[in-house]
Amino acid sequence: MYCEATRRGKLSNSTATLSIIIVNYNTCDLLKQCLASVYADIEEGSNGIVAEVIVVDNASGDGSAAMVRSLYPQVSLIESGANLGYGGGANLGLKTARGRYLMLLNSDTIVLEGALRQLVAFMDAHPDAGACGPRLLNPGSSLQRSAFRFPTLAQVALDLFPIFPRLVDTTLNGRYQQDNPANQQPFAVDFTLGAAFVVSRAAYECTGGFDADFFMYAEEVDWAMRIHAAGYHYYSVPAARVVHYAGQSVKSAPRRMFYELHHSRALLYRKHYSSVFQRAARLLTRAAMLYRALADWRQQRHGAFDAAELRQRWRVYGKIFRL
């Protein structure tokens, strides 16, 4: 059952096939590389797709906006004036996008030839699809896991306490067995990694885009849950390939991002999960923070880092403990 806007046909007019929205914060070199790959695919591999590219710059201090204006004047550049986080920045781009399909793309990605065409063709052929994501590859072309099931307590525990490495790439940890190098056939998923995915305009107008309360991380999981709730399906499309330099777009502030990861997870659990799940996840998270604090204390005593670094880490663990 799709939402009212879809059933009644009350959708905005689209003047482009695909709108590609890239949120940037101090990743000028990565953004330049990403834009080069996007335009190469638009010009060489898109088979006539009418695409627009929107870059939302979250008040970068590294000359990103000037680079876009100089090298890519055809880009629709939005300067937010502040760091709105990923979801807040993306929503600015989504509001101005004119495409029938809306692609959210990280600045630390490279779009490989034909990926845009594959994604659009899949969405055209599957009206039940509210969203789909490409296959993600590491820089060396090895597979990067990108298709996942919604979080369970088993996944929460395995992530916080990765003491059973053999279980990491199993269904118990939310992985899909179809997400492997040999499979080239699309398959239904709960969600794909937010580094690159496409949403139909119909699904966007039903669900309203990102929840900006998620500053960074888990915003794509929340949106995927709402896309499913609106009656749409979500797919992984392995034939479309995108290289993802995982973590490069957020490496400048690791402690801040570690906190934001757990803050967003707590928000996701409050928004979509039962009180029993929330309490169990909170207990697991608190136990993990205590374990990290003790492990770091031992490392600091053996000279791994100084006391100031230990205090900063403990401060972050304390904030997460209180979530």
Image (cartoon, helix red, strand yellow):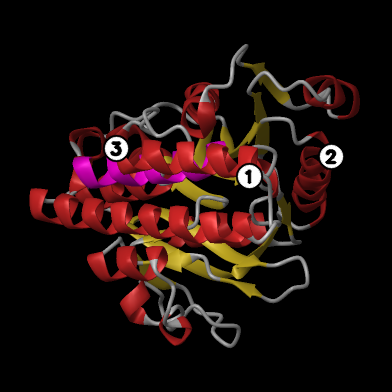
Q: Amino acid at mark 2?
A: Asp
Dot 2: within a 10 Å radius of its alpha carbon, few (fewer than 14), some, or many (20 or more) residues? some
**Residue 121 belongs to the span the image colors magenta:** no
Q: At numbered mark 2, what does the secondary structure look like: helix, strand or loop? A: helix
Q: Image height check: is 45 above or below 323?
A: below
Residue 98 visible in the displayed image: no
Q: Which mark is residue 133?
A: none
x, y percent for residue 207: 30, 36
Q: Image height check: is 135 above or below 319?
A: below
Mark sitting earlier along the chain (1/2):
2
Q: Which residue is mark 2?
A: 29
Region rendered in magenta: 256-270
> Which residue is at a point 48% across and 22% down the rendered structure image?
95
Q: Which residue is mark 1?
A: 106
Residue farthest along the right direction in this orientation: 70
Q: Amino acid at mark 1?
A: Asn
Identify the image quadrant of the C terminus: top left
Which residue is more in the foreground, 205 or 304?
304
> Which residue is at a point 48% across and 42% down the rendered structure image?
314
Is the stretch drawn in magenta largely helix, strand or loop? helix
> Picture quarter containing residue 25?
top right
Apparent side of residue 112 relative to residue 106 in the rendered image (left or right): right
Q: Image height check: is 302 above or below 199?
A: below
Q: Which residue is mark 3?
A: 322
